[in-house]
Image: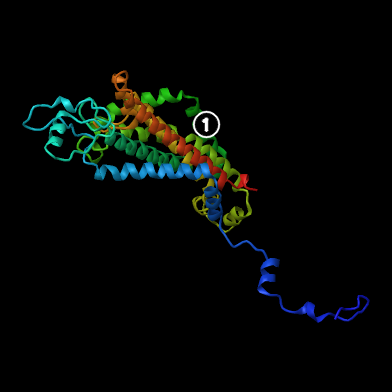
């Protein structure tokens, strides 16, 4: 029955329990999440950053797995065998070409694995040298970025939290390093350290790595930490005025504990983004130094050294310069786009 609108009688139907559909319609609450989950969700929605991440993962996995299963080695000269004369037909093969020895083996019914990118002027398979050079360049970039992260985060957090004279000394050191010509200092330090470390590493475990790579790591530790230190210092300066830092100081907590437990975790998004953007810079610097002959030791290849070696035959074999240049461009571009995606996803100032 319809209720009289002028009646004061209470309609008991209004007090019936709500159904599940009504609850779902009225209560639209977002499921609980964390800062990391929210950042990953925003990152995966960024198609450019997601595709860049997939490309970087594929390149990294290929550089790790392919040298284990590939039948050729990056340093083996295919035309040179002990007790046999040198076979010059293996030198300077084009993509998917075979030497006369391999053609003879194929005519006998034997299977010969193709040279996808041909061979270089020493008869070494060029594809596996590109893959191994990619591995070296990526390893140098990642480890150099970790060194920059550790040095910059340590000095930047100390300068930001301590302030006063400590901050002034560290920042003046940063200003001095910024005033030096960047590439000139890198080239000079690489040349000096290559001569000094060469004899010091003989007979040690680090001899297999090579003096040039060790000198690259030292250069990054000396020169490339300044941007990271300034960024973290600025974050620490704003965070040290928060109430939880004051509460920790009131309870007698030491500066190192406050930095480690309170300040660094609150800067983690900035640290991740800066490290991701530092990796392509390190890879480009390594490739640049290898191109100038100050990179990895021969016969170990890197993308920069392969491009430098390709200059000798650029008119006859231009693909030897184009291929490592394309790989360097893919890695650097992919890491830059992925770093931009991380910044857009994890920077809280951009997601307000």
- Choose top left, top right, bottom left or bottom right for residue 210: top left
Q: Is residue 158 in view?
A: no
Q: Which residue is found at the position 58% from the left and 45% from the top?
A: 347
Q: Nearer the viewer, residue 212 or 200?
A: 212
Residue on which the image places disc 1: 172
Residue 270 lies, in percent from the top left, at 53, 44
Q: Nearer the viewer, residue 220 or 170?
A: 220
Q: Which residue is found at the position 72% from the left and 78% from the top?
A: 17
Q: Which residue is found at the position 37% from the left and 39% from the top?
A: 138
Q: Quadrant of the N terminus?
A: bottom right
Residue 153 lies, in percent from the top left, at 48, 43
Q: How is the image coloured?
A: rainbow
Q: Is residue 166 in view?
A: yes
**Label 1 residue SS:** helix
Above or below residue 123? Residue 45 is below
Q: Residues within 10 Å of mark 1 (few under 14, many from 20)?
A: few
Residue 165 lies, in percent from the top left, at 55, 37
Task: Specify whether 12 is left or right of 94.
Answer: right
Task: Specify whether 306 is left or right of 41.
Answer: left
Task: Specify whether 46 is left or right of 207.
Answer: right
Above or below residue 263? Residue 172 is above
Task: Specify whether 160 is left or right of 219.
Answer: right
Q: Which residue is found at the position 86% from the left and 78% from the top?
A: 2
Residue 283 lies, in percent from the top left, at 40, 34
Above or below residue 243? Residue 73 is above
């Amino acid at each position: 029955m319809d209720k009289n609108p002028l009646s004061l009688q209470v309609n008991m139907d209004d007090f019936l329990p709500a159904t599940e559909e009504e609850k779902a319609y009225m209560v639209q609450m977002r499921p609980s999440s964390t800062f990391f989950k929210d950042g990953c969700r925003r990152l995966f929605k960024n198609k450019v950053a997601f595709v860049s991440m997939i490309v970087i993962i594929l390149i990294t996995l290929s550089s790790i797995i392919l040298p284990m299963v590939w039948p050729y080695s990056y340093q083996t000269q295919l035309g040179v065998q002990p007790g046999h004369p040198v076979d010059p037909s293996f030198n300077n093969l084009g993509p998917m070409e075979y030497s006369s020895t391999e053609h003879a083996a194929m005519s006998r019914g034997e299977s010969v694995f193709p040279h996808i990118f041909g061979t270089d002027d020493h008869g070494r398979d060029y594809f596996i040298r590109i893959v191994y050079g990619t591995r070296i360049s990526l390893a140098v970039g990642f480890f150099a970025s970790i060194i920059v992260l550790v040095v910059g985060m340590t000095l930047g957090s100390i300068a930001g939290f301590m302030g006063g004279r400590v901050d002034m000394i560290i920042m003046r050191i940063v200003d001095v390093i910024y005033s030096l010509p960047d590439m000139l200092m890198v080239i000079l330090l690489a040349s000096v350290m290559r001569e000094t470390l060469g004899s010091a590493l003989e007979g040690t475990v680090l001899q297999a790595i090579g003096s040039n790579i060790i000198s690259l790591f030292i250069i990054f530790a000396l020169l490339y930490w300044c941007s990271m230190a300034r960024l973290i210092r600025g974050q620490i300066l704003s965070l040290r005025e928060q109430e939880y830092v004051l509460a920790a100081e009131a309870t007698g907590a030491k500066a190192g504990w406050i930095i480690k437990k309170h300040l660094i975790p609150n800067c983690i998004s900035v640290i991740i983004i800066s490290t991701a953007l530092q990796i392509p810079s390190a890879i480009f610097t390594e490739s640049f130094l290898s191109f100038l002959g100050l990179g990895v030791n021969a016969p170990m290849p890197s993308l920069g050294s392969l491009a430098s070696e390709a200059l000798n035959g650029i008119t006859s074999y231009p693909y030897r310069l184009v291929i490592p240049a394309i790989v360097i461009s893919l890695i650097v571009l992919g890491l830059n786009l992925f770093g931009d995606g991380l910044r857009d996803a994890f920077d809280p100032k951009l997601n307000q």
